[in-house]
Image (spheres, rainbow, N blue to C red):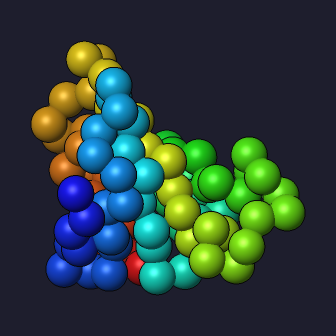
Amino acid sequence: MKWRWKFGVTVLTEAFFNEIAVSLPKPAAQAVDELAAKGVLGGVPYSRLDPNCSAQMQNVLLVAATETNTKADIEALATALKEVL
């Protein structure tokens, strides 16, 4: 499954348990820092797991959701992500 949200985010993987990998139009670490400044925990940039990854992989963000995340939490992440991208 590979699909693109309207604001430039491409879903790279099907859900694996409660996680997905998405590709952003800019470095994921930068997006996560900007999300944190808005009070939103946005996921883990792939580059934090592999500091020597390729430039393309630096745009990959790993995102998880559990039963403790509400629909409002997910919508807040999507809204904030649109703002920082």
**Can residue 4 be seen from the camera position used here?**
yes
> Which quadrant of the view contains residue 70?
top left
Looking at the picture, tell me which residue is in the foreground, 7 or 77.
7
- Quadrant containing the C terminus in the rendered view: bottom left
> Which quadrant of the view contains residue 8?
bottom left
Percent coordinates x, y for residue 29 in the rendering: 66, 63
Percent coordinates x, y for residue 9 in the rendering: 34, 72
Looking at the picture, tell me which residue is in the foreground, 31 or 64.
64
Percent coordinates x, y for residue 72 in the rendering: 17, 40
Percent coordinates x, y for residue 47 in the rendering: 72, 58
Q: Identify the residue at horizontal 45%, vertical 68% (top origin).
A: 23
Across the whole image, how many numbered discs are drawn on residues? 0
Q: Identify the residue at horizontal 25%, vertical 65% (top origin).
A: 2
Please state if 11 lies on the left or on the right of 26 as rendered. Answer: left
Furthest residue in direction front, as rendered: 1
- Quadrant containing the N terminus in the rendered view: bottom left
Q: In the image, is residue 5 above or below residue 77?
A: below
Q: Identify the residue at horizontal 46%, vertical 82% (top origin).
A: 25
Furthest residue in direction top, as rendered: 67
Please state if 57 lies on the left or on the right of 64 as rendered. Answer: right
Furthest residue in direction right, as rendered: 52
**Can residue 34 be seen from the camera position used here?**
no
Looking at the picture, tell me which residue is in the foreground, 2 or 35.
2
Q: Identify the residue at horizontal 33%, vertical 25% (top origin).
A: 17
Please state if 30 lies on the left or on the right of 71 as rendered. Answer: right
Please state if 62 lies on the left or on the right of 3 as rendered. Answer: right
> Which quadrant of the view contains residue 58?
bottom right
Q: In the image, is residue 66 above or below residue 14?
A: above
